[in-house]
Image (spheres, rainbow, N blue to C red):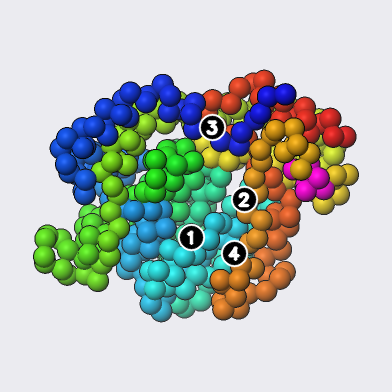
Amino acid sequence: MSQVPFVDLSWQHEPILAEITQAIAQVIEQGDFILGQAVTELETAFAQASGAEFGIGVASGTDAIALGLQACGIGVGDEVLVPANTFVATLIGVLHSGAKPVLVDCEASTALIDLAAAAQAITPQTKAIIAVHLYGQMVSPKELRDFASTHNLLIFEDAAQAHLAEREGDSAGSIGMAAAFSFYPSKNLGAMGDGGMVITSNPDVAKKVRSLRNYGAHRKYFHVDLGTNSRLDTLQAAILNIKLPHLPTWNQARNRAAQTYDHLLQPLKNKEIFPLENQSANGHIYHLYVIRIAQNCPLSRETIQEQLSAQGIQTGIHYPIPCHLQPAFEYLGYKHSDFPQAEILSQEILSLPMYPGISDSQLRQVTDAIQNLF
C-alpha cells in the first residue's frame, strides 16, 4: 500500500535543485544577505505577475498584513472586518497594526467571507475589510468592490493562499489598496523558510511599507516611522525567483487534480460528502482541496480521517477551531453561535492531499479509500 502525503515538496524541488543551489551560491558569493539583488528582482517580478506595480518583501505573511495595513493608514481606533473562518495570522496582523478585528461569518458553499453579514457589522469606526482569498479561491472582485464602494471602506487582501489566483478577470492582490502574501514553505509559491510580501499599486503605500519593514528608515540612519525589522531574506528571495516561473504550471496542475477529485467524489454526495464550491473555474489555484463531511453523513469526520491515516493517507483540518473561539481572542467578546456557518464548517471540513505532482492513481487511491469505508 503506497503512502499519499498531504504535501510533497520533493516533487517540485528535485527538478530545479541545481538552479536553487546555484542561486543560493550566488547570494553567498555576492554577500548581499539583507535586501539584496534577489529581493529587488522578486519584488518586481511577483508584483508584475500579480497585477500590481510594487512589491515589498517582508519577513512573513503576518507582517505583510500588519505593515500593509499600517501603510494604508489603518491603526488605533479603527475597525477592520475579518472573516471568522481564517487562520489566526489574519487577526494577529490586524492587532499588530493597532486596529481592532471585527469578525463576520462565512458562506457555507465556499467558506469565503459573507459580505451580507459583513454589512451588518459596520460601525462608524469601520475603515477596512480584509478579503481572505481562502484555500486558493478569491472573494468575488465585483462584489467586493461594490461592497467597499457602498460602505466607503478600504479593501485589503489576505492572499496568503492565493498566489496568482484569478476571478472575474482580476488577479489576487490587484483589487485592493494593498495585499499580503505568505511564502511559507507549503504555499503554492513557498520559500525554504519564512517570508512574505506586500504588493500595491499605490506608490505612497509602497514607500511606507519599505520604511516600516526597515526600522522606519527611508535611508540609513534616518528614521521617520516607528518601524520594525521585517525584511525578506535575500537567500529566500533567490529561491523564490527560481520557483516563480514554474508557478502558473504548478497552479494549473493543482486545478486539474481538483477537477479529478470533483469527478471521483461524485458518488459520495449521497453520503453527504462533497467539496466546497469552485466559483472561479480555472482561476482557483487550490492551495487546499477541502471537502465537507456533513453532520448527517453515516460516518464521522474523525472516523474517516483515522481510517485514511491507517491506510497511509494524510489529511488536515483548516481550521478546527474558528478564530472567535480561540482562547487568545476571548477578550474580543465573542461566544459560541455568534458565527454559525464558521462553526459548522469547523466541524465538517477535511482537507485532502493536494500538490502539483499528485498522480491520478493517488487521487483515486484517496477517493476509493473513502468510498470503501461505506
The reply to whether dot 1 and dot 2 touch (C-beta < 8 Å) is no
Q: Earlier in the sequence, mark 3 or mark 2?
A: 3
> Under tag 2, what secondary structure?
loop
User: Would you name the residue on which mark 2 appears?
Assistant: 318
- Near mark 2 (Cα within 10 A), the count class, few <14, some 14-19 or many ≥20, is some
C-alpha separation, residue under disc 1 versus residue under disc 4: 10 Å
> Under tag 4, what secondary structure?
helix
C-alpha separation, residue under disc 4 versus residue under disc 3: 28 Å
**Prevailing SS of the magenta stretch:** helix
- Near mark 1 (Cα within 10 A), the count class, few <14, some 14-19 or many ≥20, is many
Residue 357's mark?
A: none
Q: Earlier in the sequence, mark 4 or mark 3?
A: 3
User: Would you name the residue on which mark 4 appears?
Assistant: 323
Q: Which quadrant is the N terminus positioned in?
A: top right
Q: Amino acid at mark 4?
A: Cys
Q: Amino acid at mark 3?
A: Asp
The reply to whether dot 1 and dot 4 touch (C-beta < 8 Å) is yes
Q: Specify the quadrant of the image occupied by residue 113.
A: bottom right
Q: Assess whether residue 304 is covered by the magenta stretch.
A: yes
> Under tag 3, what secondary structure?
loop
Tell me where the magenta segment starts and ends, as one range.
300-305
- Near mark 3 (Cα within 10 A), the count class, few <14, some 14-19 or many ≥20, is some
C-alpha separation, residue under disc 1 versus residue under disc 2: 14 Å
- Residue at the image point whose x is 53% and y is 61% from the top: 88
Residue 8's mark?
A: 3
- Near mark 4 (Cα within 10 A), the count class, few <14, some 14-19 or many ≥20, is many
C-alpha separation, residue under disc 3 versus residue under disc 2: 18 Å
Q: Earlier in the sequence, mark 4 or mark 2?
A: 2
Q: Amino acid at mark 1?
A: Thr
Q: Is residue 106 visible?
A: yes
The reply to whether dot 3 and dot 2 touch (C-beta < 8 Å) is no
C-alpha separation, residue under disc 3 versus residue under disc 1: 26 Å
